[in-house]
Image (cartoon, rainbow, N blue to C red):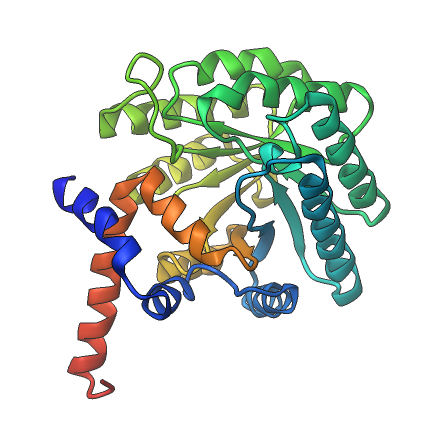
Amino acid sequence: MILDRALVRLLPAVPRPVVRSISSRYIAGPELSDASATVRALNAQGKLATVDVLGEEITNEEETHVIARAYEDVLAEIGRRHLDSNISVKPTALGLELDFALCRRNLERLVHRARVRGNFVRIDMEDATTTDATLTLYRELRNAGFDELGIVLQASLKRTISDVDAVSDLRPNVRLCKGIYLESPDIQFRDFHDVQKSFVSTLEALFDVGCYVGIATHDDWLIDQTKRIIGERSLSPDAYEFQMLLGVRAALGNALVEDGHRLRIYVPFGSHWYEYSLRRLQENPSIAGYIASDTLGRFLHLRRNGSA
């Protein structure tokens, strides 16, 4: 942990070309065409995708409309290219922290655009200050008849089992993840094994109420537990999916596909790739250690094989 935080402090001093070289494995690129090409390649490998438009802090209403229009372009591209992909949006990028009503209008328009194209929108979950508002936004739109809409729950938050109960009547389509945001220990499990236990308990609870679940993890133990639960419940492959980040543990993802599981890859793109890279690392310093070790491992592999 000390080393991870030290790596994060050094990141702003790392030249942009170096950061770009590292992040290129985890971000499709700056343009929609980059995301489209990445999704086509994933589809050819039997994988699904969800596209995320990278954006930074929203300070006014017009910026929310820019993000919304960018997502409309993504939906159009998905339809035009017949890509097997949906979209994932952060409510703060659509104005949640500026005005709840503004965010709802932007999101409702996107979900409508997705509906007419036979597609789907996932509402990302952000830090804990936005959890209640995000769940309220989700319920309001579902109650308004927008079923082409999913939510995210974070296993590291102590409230999450209660949140499953609160939305169970909607039988939501849920992405279940550990959660990247560092919160107060009063509201968040900090112990690694406690988070794992919460993940499994939440997954069981979601299946109990008939939810379709996107199991978003790269954790071998959690994947094994998920396979056990799926087997015990005799769930068919269309009742769930695994989800992973672009460029992370690709061999594991390939193995899941080969075993007959659905796998969806999270594909971020946009001009704010540098800010996104730094922000994700600052939010969760342990990722810096992972990327550093992963990058070093690839470099050493190339050296051993005479490619560098």
Left or right: 145 as drawn, with respect to 43 = right
Residue at coordinates 37% horizontally, 50% vertically from top-left? 278
Quadrant of the image occupied by residue 222: top left
Q: Is residue 212 visible?
A: no
Left or right: 104 as drawn, with respect to 50 = right
Q: Nearer the viewer, residue 96 or 120?
A: 96
Vertical relation: 198 (above or below) 169 = below
Residue 71 x/y as whole percent: 70, 49
Residue at coordinates 35% horizontally, 35% vertically from top-left? 225
Left or right: 58 as drawn, with respect to 77 = left
Residue 233 x/y as whole percent: 49, 30
Q: Is residue 100 visible?
A: yes
Residue at coordinates 80% horizontally, 47% vertically from top-left? 118
Quadrant of the image occupied by residue 154: top left
Residue 132 x/y as whole percent: 56, 16
What is the tally of numbered marks visible in this picture? 0
Which quadrant is home to the C terminus? bottom left
Q: Residue furthest right?
A: 116
